[in-house]
C-alpha cells in the first residue's frame, strides 16, 4: 500500500462528499448481512475472504488519517529527525511515519529516497542526498531503541549500482561496470538482534 503526501495518505480513503462515516458503517453492516446469508447458503470461503477484506478496508479508512497526522509528535521528535521532518512526503517525515506504522504492528515497511544514480556533480549531489537521509535514518534507529522496539524490528539501507552498457564512465560521477564479477550491493542493517559494528565483504 503506497502512502502519499497529499490530503489522502492512501487513495480513496475519504468518503465522497455528503457521505458520512456513519453511513459508510451502516452500508458495510448491511453488506456483511447479505454476504453472511450468501455464505450460509454456499459455504464458499471466498465469501468469507470478501467480508474480511471489506472490514479491513474500513479499519484502514478509519485509522490511516490519524496514523499519518504527525501534528501531535513532540518538538523533540522533529528535532531528532531533522529539518525536513515537518515537510509532508520528505524522507525524514516518512521515517517518523515508519515508526508510527511499526508501533501499530505493521510487519513490513519500505522507505524510498530516489535519485542516487549520480552521473555528474557527484560530490555535490551525494552530499545533498546524505543530508536528507543520514540524520532521519539514524533518528529512526535511535527512536525505536528509546521506545524499546529495536530488538523486535530490523532495518536496512541498500545502495545499488546500475549498469549502463559494458562500461560507462562519467566525469565527476559513478563508474558503472555491467559485466564485472564483483558488482556492488552495499547495505547496512540494524536492530532485530543483528550484531552491530560488523563490516562484511569488500570491493576492488
Image (cartoon, rainbow, N blue to C red):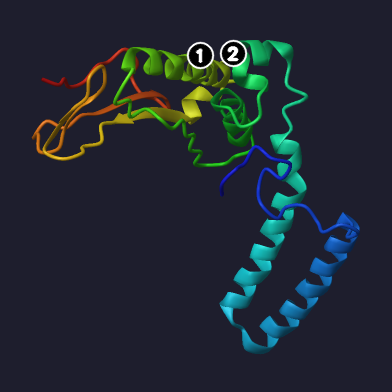
Residue at image position (47%, 20%) is 133
User: In x, y percent, where is residue 144?
Assistant: 55, 22
- Residue at numbered disc 2: 82
- Residue 130 drawn above or below residue 96: above
Indicate the position of residue 185 as horizontal and vertical percent values.
25, 30
Q: Earlier in the sequence, mark 1 or mark 2?
A: 2
Rate crowding at label 2 as few (under 14), some (14 to 19) or many (20 or more) other CA atoms within 10 Å: some
The secondary structure type at the circle numbered 1 is: helix
In this rendering, position of residue 88 left or right of residue 149: right
The residue at which mark 1 appears reads as 135
Q: CA distance from mark 1 to mark 2?
A: 6 Å
Q: Residue at x 61, y 83 (%)?
A: 43
Q: Quadrant of residue 77?
A: top right
The numbered mark at residue 15 is: none
Relative image position of residue 154 (x, y in whole percent):
44, 29
Whether residue 180 is situated above or below residue 150 in the rendered picture: below
Please tell me whether mark 2 sits on a helix, a strand or a loop.
loop
Of residues 55 and 40, the one drawn nearer to the viewer in this rendering: 55
Question: Residue drawn at (57%, 41%), measured in percent from left and top?
Answer: 106
What is the tally of numbered marks visible in this picture?
Answer: 2
Q: Are marks 1 and 2 in contact (CB under 8 Å)?
A: yes
**For the C terminus, which image quadrant?**
top left
Q: Give the percent coordinates (x, y) of residue 74.
A: 73, 16
Q: Nearer the viewer, residue 129 or 172?
A: 172
- Label 1 Cα crowd, 10 Å radius (few <14 / some 14-19 / many 20+): some
Q: What residue occupies the far bottom of the structure in this picture? A: 41
Q: Is residue 29 left or right of residue 132?
A: right
The foreground one among 16 and 153 is 16
Query: Residue at position x 77%, y 52% from top?
Result: 14
Q: In the image, is residue 74 above or below residue 101?
A: above
Amino acid at each position: 500500500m503506497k502512502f502519499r503526501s497529499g490530503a489522502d495518505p492512501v487513495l480513496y480513503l475519504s468518503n465522497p462528499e455528503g457521505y458520512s462515516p456513519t453511513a459508510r458503517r451502516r452500508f458495510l453492516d448491511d453488506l456483511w448481512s447479505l454476504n453472511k446469508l450468501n455464505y450460509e447458503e454456499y459455504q464458499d470461503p471466498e465469501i468469507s475472504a470478501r467480508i474480511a477484506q471489506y472490514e479491513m478496508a474500513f479499519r484502514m479508512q478509519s485509522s490511516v488519517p490519524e496514523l499519518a497526522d504527525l501534528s501531535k509528535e513532540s518538538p523533540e521528535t522533529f528535532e531528532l529527525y531533522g529539518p525536513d521532518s515537518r515537510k509532508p512526503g520528505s524522507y525524514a517525515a516518512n521515517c517518523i511515519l515508519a515508526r508510527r506504522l511499526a508501533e501499530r504492528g505493521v510487519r513490513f515497511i519500505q522507505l524510498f529516497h530516489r535519485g542516487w544514480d549520480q552521473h555528474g556533480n557527484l560530490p555535490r549531489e551525494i552530499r545533498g542526498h546524505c543530508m536528507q537521509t543520514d540524520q532521519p535514518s539514524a533518528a529512526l534507529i535511535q527512536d525505536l531503541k528509546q521506545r524499546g522496539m529495536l530488538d523486535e524490528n530490523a532495518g536496512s539501507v541498500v545502495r545499488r549500482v546500475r549498469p549502463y552498457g559494458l562500461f560507462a564512465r562519467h566525469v565527476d560521477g559513478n563508474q558503472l561496470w555491467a559485466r564485472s564479477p564483483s558488482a556492488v550491493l552495499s547495505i547496512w542493517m540494524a536492530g532485530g538482534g543483528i550484531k552491530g559494528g560488523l563490516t562484511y565483504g569488500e570491493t576492488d
